[in-house]
Amino acid sequence: MVKKILVIIPCYNEEETISALLDELISLQISDSFKLMIAVINDCSTDKTPFLAEKFPVTVINLPVNLGIGGAMQTGYKYALQNNFDLAIQIDGDGQHPPNELYKLLECWQKTNANIVIGSRFLYKQGFQSSTMRRWGVKYFHWLNHFFTGIHIYDSTSGFRLFDRRAISLAVKHYPDEYPEPESIILFTKSGLKIHETQVIMKERQGGKSSIQHFSQLYYMVKVSIAMFFSYIRK
Amino acid sequence: MAKIQIIVIIVNIIFLAFIAKLITKVKLREEYAIVWILITILLAIFSFWRKGLDIISSLFGVYEPANFVFTGFIFFILVYLLHLSIVNSKQQRSITELTQEIALLKEQMKNNKTTQSN
């Protein structure tokens, strides 16, 4: 049976990268057992992102109010659930996640049948590795996640992820809205989902700005730690 | 009656009138107004019954009635702020959900239109 896959691209002011990304995604060759569809979630961009995206044969969902990455992602999952997609893959709109790495997530999913597959930068340390500061941050989250869940996720901040139907329906019900990645791992493991990591090669962001910068890095660490703790003790 | 009592009573009356006006103009929901009305009543009671403050403070073992008033009010304000944060969080959740629904509906409508025109 052909599996329907929705590629979810949350975008906030990504006019520099969105066209190239969509170009690459559309020309992607994947096996016949998969059918790829693309949904761009425009999180109230103030630049030309939605107009550029409309030129491609993709679904563009325009949020009338800026919700942040988590809320935008959740919109994608809701769309996936409503339209009966079997799998959802989230890709950042800034070009960090090369589309041709997508098949690695699919391969891992076929092999392991996990509910969630996370594309990781750090399993074999290939490709863009990010700054020292951020790597420390990622190590810290690896430790914290291991502490709470007992499983090893080396790149828990990675937004390059594949969700199966069970994971999608969970994310539709509850998904953190500000910095969702590390926190959601706890939510999903607590619900008994199987999470696997697979090596992918990421690039440096090709344009736009990270949502996490300078002083907010500290805020990010604190906020996410607290959120993880409370996700852990939540029933 | 001491000067301060008269001042407090007048302020109280103005405050009550202001709250009443806000409610009648539907600028303040009744559930929030209850708290403010209760406070004005409390203030009114103690402005008429000055000894009451001394009695209650000594009941709690506080030497200065003024300290008792400050502590009590600060605690109350903190609780009320927490309540407002809860209200705010709930609203944020509702807004998120509404935004997502609207976005998805708009997309669906756009889809329907293109299939109809084809």
Image (tube, coloured by chain):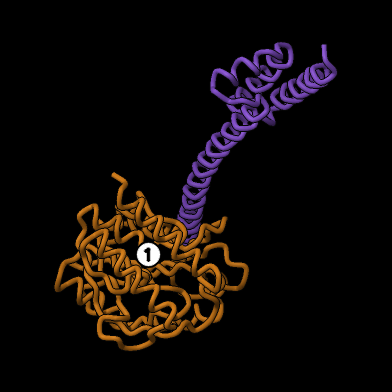
Chain colours: A orange, B purple
Relative side of A180 to B64, left or right: left
On the image, which quarter does residue B27 sit in?
A: top right
Which residue of the protein is positioned furthest toward the front in this rendering?
B63
Quarter of the image that includes the C terminus of chain A:
top left
Taking the image as shown, residue A217 lies to the left or right of residue A227, namely right
Image location (x, y in percent) of residue A119: 30, 75
Tag 1's secondary structure?
helix
Q: Left or right? Give the position of A114 relative to A167.
A: left
Residue B117 shows up from this direction: no
Residue linked to disc 1: A181
Disc 1 marks a residue whose amino acid type is Glu
> Measuring 73% from the left and 16% from the top, which residue is drawn there?
B47
Which residue is found at the position 35% from the left and 64% from the top? Answer: A182
Near-viewer residue (B96 or B6): B6
Question: Is residue B83 among the parts visible in the rendering?
Answer: yes
Query: Which quarter of the rendering shows the N terminus of chain A?
Result: bottom left
**B83 in relation to A167, above or below:** above
Q: Quadrant of residue B39?
A: top right
- Above or below, A54 against A177 in this view is below
- The single residue placed furthest to the bottom in the displayed view is A127
Question: Residue, x 68% and y 27% (percent of image)?
Answer: B66
The location of residue A190, given as percent across then percent down, is 24, 53
